Amino acid sequence: MNKNVETRYAASPREVKQMDTQELRDEFLIEKLFISNEVKLVYSHYDRYIIGGVMPVDKTIPLEVVDALKANYFLERRELGIINVGGKGSVEVDGTAYELNHKEALYVGSGNKEINFVSAVASEPAKFYINSTPAHKSFPVKKIGLDDVEVTELGSLETANARTIRKYIVNSVVDVCQLQMGMTTLKEGSVWNTMPAHVHDRRMEIYFYIDVPQDQAVCHFMGQPTETRHIWMANEQAVISPPWSIHSGSGTCAYTFVWGMAGENLDYSDMDMCKINELR
Ligand SMILES: O=C[C@H](O)[C@@H](O)CC(=O)C(=O)O
Ligand SMILES: [Zn+2]
């Protein structure tokens, strides 16, 4: 057994309907991703998605293969997306270093053997949020800075859902097999993300909430559109969204979150929208 590796199985709508607060949290919430000088990984059986955190403080931290993969190295059959949500750091991919500032991203295609993470300054460590999915083909490594992302504005202040979507790892920005990642930032005064809500039964999704002040929280909504549940979340916590589930949230103030998804197709806008007045 590897240290700091958790498995989460895939639950069906029928099971989830019966869950109480703690069961929902155990099944879907990822409470802690960043441990000093360690790698933390959660292996989800939804689309075999891996969610992780790497926080190097005063040493270089490698991404080593884990038993769950039965592979010779982590990216033998996988691709990887990295977004730095902490201080300045760099990721070394088979000897080439890529500097990642706060909110910069790196895509690493399959076939790359040695991945190392390092922080620039120990007092302000980098926090590398990572997502990884099975890959059938190797695509080049690419850094995605704030100037490279695709930006979309959604919502309005009147409906408290004005937000900026930044698409980092989508196939119009970088060649990928199935991984998509981006970041959504709520405007001051807006609190609702992904409202109107949607599902995409073809793809699962992970939300990772950041920039949530310590005394505030985000109430994340999940479940089938007519059978919703909620999970209260704090800063730097992630939540797994089954393919059949809505994934939406309302905060007690503005916040940011990283979204990541995988499964069928690479069409970001392929969503089945839910009517707000039909949610239950
Ligand atoms: O399938 C796409 C994802 O759920 C998110 O990109 C949606 C989102 O960030 C938002 O509407 O606020
Ligand atoms: Zn979605």
Image: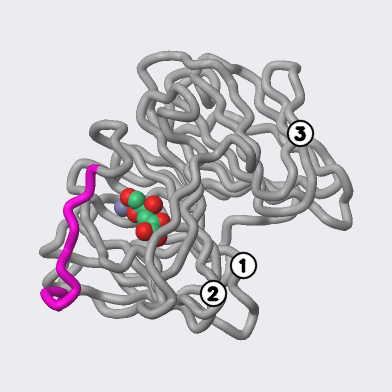
Q: Which residues are magenta?
A: 270-280
Q: CA distance from mark 3 to mark 2?
A: 28 Å
Tell me the kind of residue under disc 3: Glu
Give the percent coordinates (x, y) of residue 155: 38, 66
Give the percent coordinates (x, y) of residue 226: 11, 72
Q: Is residue 112 above or below residue 33?
A: above
Residue at image mark 3: 99
Give the mark nearer the N terminus: 3 vs 1: 3
Confirm whether the magenta stretch covers residue 279.
yes
Give the mark nearer the N terminus: 3 vs 2: 3
| The quarter of the displayed image where residue 73 is located | top right
| Residue 3 falls left or right of residue 102 | left
Confirm whether the magenta stretch covers residue 216.
no
Give the percent coordinates (x, y) of residue 146: 63, 42
Give the percent coordinates (x, y) of residue 141: 59, 21
Give the mark toward the camera: 2 or 1. 2
Residue at image mark 1: 211
Element on which disc 1 rests: loop
Element on which disc 2 rests: loop
Residue count near mark 2 (Cα–Cα under 10 Å), binned few <14, some 14–19, many ≥20: many
| Residue 175 falls left or right of residue 37 | left
Judge by depth and name the residue closer to the eye, 254 or 16.
254
| The quarter of the displayed image where residue 107 is located | top right
Residue count near mark 1 (Cα–Cα under 10 Å), binned few <14, some 14–19, many ≥20: some
Q: Is residue 278 above or below residue 179?
A: below
Residue at image mark 2: 254
